[in-house]
Amino acid sequence: MTTVFLGGALVAAAVTLFILQPILSGLHASLDRVEDELTDTEARKRIALLALRDVEYDFLTGKLDEPDYLSLKADLTAEALAALEADETASDTHFLDDDVEAEITKIRAALRLGLMCGSCGFGNDDGSHFCSACGQELKIGVVG
């Protein structure tokens, strides 16, 4: 009886340690997107294109008759095109957002370090003593 209880306790302990192992080892899920991870629009595009390929194979092997093939092909083509357009729109917006955020970060850093030209408003690089756009002397440490 005690061996059964001891065996059950060991199994329960092993299962508990297995479940808690990621927490105990400090592993965590990243909130950043990994490069090889698909976005929702990329997944929609991939699924639509794979389904379109499968419909082509089914028609060529005789599993689908022509009216069914044409109907499915039209539906899947429309879905694939919608996914492609959504993917292009999302990627354009993403790159635009990155460019805008980079510019805002550069302007904030220039303001903080006194590298923003008081004459023309150009954000100069760190270590500049004169404005790269108009040549005006920068007042390092003074905003405006």
Image: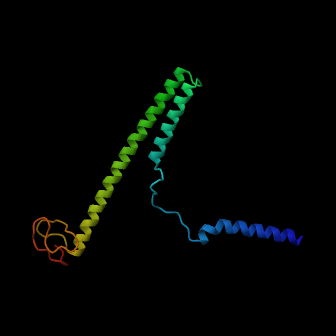
Compared with 68, 118 (above or below) is below
Q: Which residue is drawn at the image coordinates 54% and 30% (left, top)?
A: 57
Does 54 sit left or right of 144 as displayed? right
Query: Given the current orientation, which residue lies at the most extreme top position?
Result: 66
Residue 126 placement (x, y as % from top left): 23, 72
- Could you tell me residue 114's position as x and y percent? 20, 74
The N terminus: image quadrant: bottom right
Residue with the most extreme bottom position = 141
Look at 67% across and 66% down and name the residue there.
18
The residue sitting at 29% across, 66% down in the picture is 105
Specify the quadrant of the image occupied by residue 135. bottom left
Q: Does residue 103 appear left or right of residue 122 in this picture?
A: right
Q: Position of residue 144 (x, y in %)?
A: 16, 72
Q: Where is residue 140 in the image (x, y as percent from the top left)?
A: 18, 77
Position of residue 76 relative to residue 16, above or below, is above
- Is 58 on the left-hand or right-hand side of 93? right
The residue sitting at the front extreme is: 61
Of residue 59 and residue 43, the one placed in the foreground of this image is: 59
Question: Which residue is painted at 54% across and 24% down in the image?
Answer: 68
